[in-house]
Amino acid sequence: MIAFREMVGRFCPSLRVLALVGVTSVLTIVAGSSLKPEGAALAAAPPCDNYSSEITPPENIGVVITTFPNGYTRTGVQYVDFKTYVKNVLPNEWLPNWPQGAYQAGALAVKQFGWYFVNHWRGQTFNGQCFHVEDNDRDQRYIANSQTVPTGYAAEQTWNWLLQSGGKVYATYHQAGYSSDACGQYYGSPRDGVHMSQYGSQACALANTGWPRISVDSNPNTGVGYYFPNSNTPIPAMDLTGDHIYGQWHGALTWGGAPWTPVSVSPSAAGYSTWKFKSTNNCGPPSITPFDYGLASDIKVVGDWDGDGSHTQGVARLGGGTITWYLRNSRTAGAPSYTAFAYGGYGDIPVVGDWDGNGSWTPGVYRNGHWLLSNTNAFNPNPLDVYYGSGGDTPEPGKWKTSGSQPVTIGVIRQAASGNLSWWLRDSNTPGNPTIPVFEYGGNLDRPITGDFIADTTSQFGAGIVRDDVADCTPGTTPNQGWYLRYTPTPGSPNITPFRYELIRP
Amino acid sequence: MIKPLVAAVAGIGLMGAAAGVYVVASPGGGEEEAVSQLPSPTVPLESPLPSILPTIPADLPPPADGYTWYVSPPSNFGLQRYAVQVPLEWAALNPGDSNPQDFAPLGLQNILLGPSLTTVTTIAAEASAPAFRFELPSQGGQLCGILPSGHLASGTYVWDLFRFKCPMGEPSVCQADITSNLIGCRSADGSPATSTIDGRAAEVHTGAFFFSIIAFDPQSAPPPNGVLEQAVSSLALR
């Protein structure tokens, strides 16, 4: 536990220097693409009862603007881009200068709450327009253009995740709580499975607890998950029955050979994950006919499970308190190639890699800074336990050395003081300091991705990001997921001409 | 919970099917004509109560002394229309077909500083009773204590009655104890919360909708007697 804390302290000075070195190129990246313009946040007025999805977040949300905090008198309705809404609620519900783990738990709670009431329009109208939520404490406090750097980062890092109860989105209530709330407490009482204490989430994050565990943790003895039912939960309540899980409604991954190229996974109308493998790093359609594998809410992974040099898909699915893995050795629909096996529990983030360098990719989980790495595609009660990172970090394993065959090793992304993505990479699966100089690549609204993006003699992975882009790649389609890839784990401009591939959002 | 006694009463179109003579605000010529034949307005046309209809629809009786009718405008969204009596000197705070609609004494903009009334129609399929909680502070009254307080038969409806207490302005939480029929509010140190707002509500489930009337009764500004009761007893779903 101490290793990484020491590492952080020791690296702070050099981090600043490295950050300065990287700033120019990072800014080049940020400025070189067109993020969704602010004016696009306001969308045309739609009806309010025409959208319901338990998988895909809505595109817009109707927000009535009121005189709050001076009453609830309504002054107008805005139809706000849904991600913009989340980003402009979070800083008004969670206080400034809190740890990322709290913001990320909050980002998920805010998103799910708004999403639920888009799914369930209650009938609110104002002067000929309908709306889903008020901008005040009757729902969630929304103030246009109030987004902050850390809360925007939190919203992006959790954007492709979702919470479900019995397969449905539920209302994730959240209140301030008492400032004295401990992790897992709600107004001084044990968590009730329905409400999150914002102060409690802060306490969790300060104790190095990540958003999955803050939100959904099924351990009846030590669990702190605010939205996991327990003996205090006042259920059965509407939309709170069934197993409480988290999952992914979307996936942005890479696969190789070399060079590595994109995989986009999106929900199908039938409720499955549709996999779209692409073989080149440029605009264009999928290279392999899209196929369905796994449920739409499954956590998506790609790896070379049998070590034959070919990367294929897999899913990790929460259920009954554990994570069950379904891995297939062919980029086609069909049954898993391995007997489904349990590995990890609620509160863990699944990761995959060739941890021992034998060519076969196997599962792991990231749990509050612990990497629990298994070298078999079967249940493994004795994984390698490496402490590296913190609960608010995003795990990003890869091959970081410049030469030779090598295992996939640990790495984390965290927000730098500049707001940009900061890469903390280590080339062995052991505790310690980063072995790759810490660098920045990507802005606070980008999502990290990695892979071996150049066909050369090394297997080293490069830094990459995906971000929301506006322009279309192919006329007549609306892909808006921009890919910005480098050959090496270093700061700089993209080595590959940025391209757009597939949707990251509705 | 007692459900509505009569789901279909002659002369009352629960889904607003009979747009008829009471659509006072409608631009439709026939309806205007019907309205124009009504007695003189209860409230002068230059009244500062722009959202409270200045005329009495033909099928509504004269309001009680000190009250006037509010008739909800036609909804573009298929919502239940209604008419309800509110104090004569109160204003509707939101224009048009606003749902919920708030009423408060002239000049009062913050209904929590009341007294005030809120009327709201909620789609029953998207909510569970009591649906009025969505109009309470703290994400639908999550920090409020809500207790049932009996039933009230009025006309064709039997209303469920509630009283509630919500924390105001300090980190505290209220909880209802059905056994003792008390609502307690505590601060972080366990002491009773000093800043709360009280209120009452009435709710009826009619067909596809909950219809709710909420009265915020701050202790600093208690409402005139019988405001909630008059609203409930006068309600006519249309």
Image (spheres, rainbow, N blue to C red):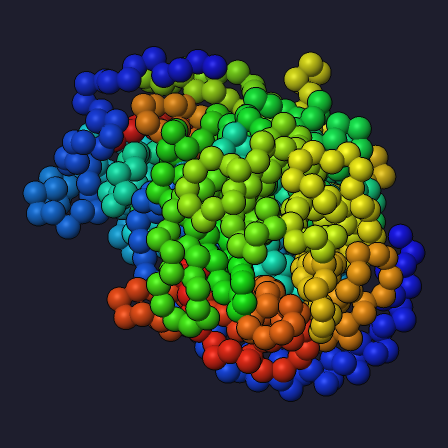
Task: Please state the horizontal and vertical placement of residue B66, each as a whole percent of the image.
Answer: 39, 36
Q: Nearer the viewer, residue B190 or A404?
A: A404
Location of residue A142 by image quarter: bottom right
Q: Is residue A338 left or right of residue A46?
A: right
Up-down relation of residue A209 to residue A234 (above or below): below
The answer to whether residue B213 of the structure is visible from this angle is: yes
Q: Identify whether A351 is placed above or below A452.
A: above
- Can you see residue A446? no
Residue beneath the point at 59% across and 75% down: A456
Q: Is residue A294 above or below residue B237?
A: below
Foreground residue, A357 or A192? A357
Expressed as whole percent of the image width and height from the top left, the position of residue A239 reads 51, 30
Q: In the shown orientation, is residue A490 left or right of residue B228?
A: right
Image location of residue A275, percent across then percent down: 43, 50
Residue A153, x across and y down, in percent: 62, 64
Q: Residue at x 71, y 22 (%)?
A: A231
Quarter of the image that includes the C terminus of chain A: bottom left
The residue sitting at 54% across, 54% down in the picture is A311
Q: Which residue is at 63% across, 24% downward? A: A234
Q: Is residue B91 or residue B187 the one in the foreground?
A: B187
